[in-house]
Amino acid sequence: MGRGAAPWPGAGVLVAGLTLAVCAAATGCGAPAPDGGPAPTPTPSTTAVRPERLCERAVAYWARRLLDGDSYGDYQSMGLSNRQYDILRAVLEEARQVKARQGPGPARELIDRRVHAGCARAYRDGGPTAGPWG
C-alpha cells in the first residue's frame, strides 16, 4: 500500500458516514424538517436570531392555531413569555372578529401584520429584562 492510501477500500465511505453522523448529532444537519419538508439549513452558532423575530414566529404560530379552533394550555405550556402572550391575546381577539366578518384569509393577514407590529414594539429595546418571562 502506498503512502496516503486508504488502509482498505471502504475507509472513505466510513469516514464520510461518521462525519455525517457526528454533524447530525451535534447540529441537526441532515435531519428532516418536522413538516416532512427539506432539512433546515444549519446556521453558525454566532448568528443570533433577534428577539422580535422569535416573538413573531411563536406568537403568529399560536394565533393561527387558536384562530382555527385549536385549544392549548396556558402561555407557559405554549413556550411564550408573558409579553408574547399579551400580544397573542390582543391579536387573537381582533383576528376572531375579522374572521367572523370577512373570513379566515383576512384574519390571517391581520395576524401577520399585528404580530409583526406588536413584537417589534415589545422588543424595540432588545430582549427581556425581567427574567425569561419578560
Image (cartoon, helix red, strand yellow):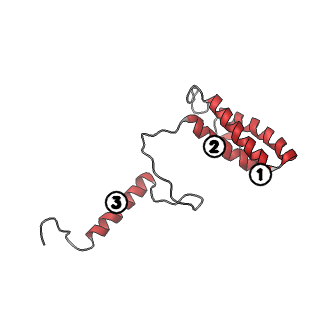
Q: Is residue 64 left or right of residue 10?
A: right
Sequence-first disc among 2 and 1: 2
Among the two numbered marks 2 and 3 on one chain, the one whose residue lies closer to the N terminus = 3
State the SS at label 3: helix
Kindly identify the residue that appears in the image at 69 percent across and 42 percent down: 112
Q: What numbered label is drawn on residue 19?
A: 3
Of the residues shown, which amino acid type is indicated by label 3? Thr
Q: Is residue 72 visible?
A: no
Q: Say which of 86 and 44 sits in front.
A: 44
Q: Residues within 10 Å of mark 1 (few under 14, many from 20)?
A: few
Label 2: which secondary element: helix
Q: Which residue is mark 1?
A: 68
Real-space CA distance between mark 1 and mark 3, rounded to the nearest whole angstrom? 43 Å
Residue where numbered disc 2 is placed: 58
Instruction: Tell me the quarter of the image containing the N terminus.
Output: bottom left
Q: Secondary structure at mark 1?
A: loop
As displayed, is residue 93 above or below residue 15? above
Q: Dot 3: within a 10 Å radius of its alpha carbon, few (fewer than 14), some, or many (20 or more) residues?
A: few
Does residue 50 show up?
yes
